[in-house]
Amino acid sequence: MGPGLRRDDNCAFGRHMTPLRAGIIAAIVTLVADQASKLWLLNGFDLARRGVVKVTPFFDLVLAWNIGISFGWLQNDSQSAQIALMAVKAVAVIALAIWMARSQTRLATVALGLIIGGAIGNGIDRFAYGAVVDFALFHVEIGGNTYNWYVFNLADVAIVAGVAALLYDSFLGVPAVKAP
């Protein structure tokens, strides 16, 4: 190795990357992908004007403004309720970041990064628009009845994937540092 180079300098994105760095990268990639998709769908694609856009027989793009929390629970558009949701989200992100900094496994740390990136992405929406921008809708038709899933976004996908990875890591993976 040359002067001034550390062992990890040559493999910043390789297998020698620290779990914390991997978690931070997961959070940043999640945040950027989430916000870019929402900005493009709102401003470039103009989803609000287009209405429902059928992508496949089971998937549509549709604009939904979620003023509640996960899955539209606790719908309330008052300013005090929005401030309270933002405060809870900020505390949760701080707690998750502390957990991520203490985590010893790459899977748990990346999972926490996905959750943090998704939470920040949805928090930016709430701050910028007063609601979370949701746009993805899966549905299925059975016997003439259409069954819809909740409308969601990439941040939601990252949060669910992060929680699933944390559950896997907790029950089947190498023991991870527990939540603070």
Image (cartoon, rainbow, N blue to C red):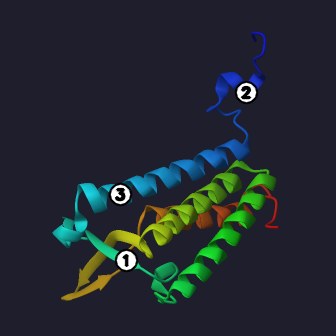
- Label 2 – label 3 distance at C-alpha: 35 Å
Q: Extreme top residue here?
A: 2
Residue that numbered label 1 is attached to: 65
Q: Decide which of 4, 114 is in the foreground and name it.
A: 4
Label ID, residue 8: 2
Where residue 159 sits, quadrant-wise, is bottom right
Q: In which quarter of the image is the C terminus?
A: bottom right
Image x and y of residue 157, in percent: 48, 64
What's the residue type where badge 1 is placed? Trp
Element at label 3 = helix
Residue at 42% from the left image edge and 71% from the top image edge = 129
Label ID, residue 25: none
Q: Which of marks 2 and 1 is in front?
A: 1
Residue that numbered label 3 is attached to: 39
| Sequence-first tag of 2 and 3 | 2
Q: How crowded is mark 3: few (under 14 residues within 10 Å), some or many (20 or more)?
A: some
Image x and y of residue 108, in percent: 70, 56
| Sequence-first tag of 1 and 3 | 3
- Label 2 – label 1 distance at C-alpha: 44 Å
Q: Are the residues at dot 2 and dot 1 in contact (C-beta closer than 8 Å)?
A: no
Residue at 56% from the left image edge and 62% from the top image edge = 120
**Residue 172 showing in the rendered view:** no
What's the residue type where badge 3 is placed? Leu
Residue at 61% from the left image edge and 33% from the top image edge = 13
Element at label 2 = helix
- Residue 49 position (above or below residue 85): above
Q: Decide which of 71, 175 is in the foreground and name it.
A: 71
Element at label 1 = strand
Residue at 32% from the left image edge and 82% from the top image edge = 148
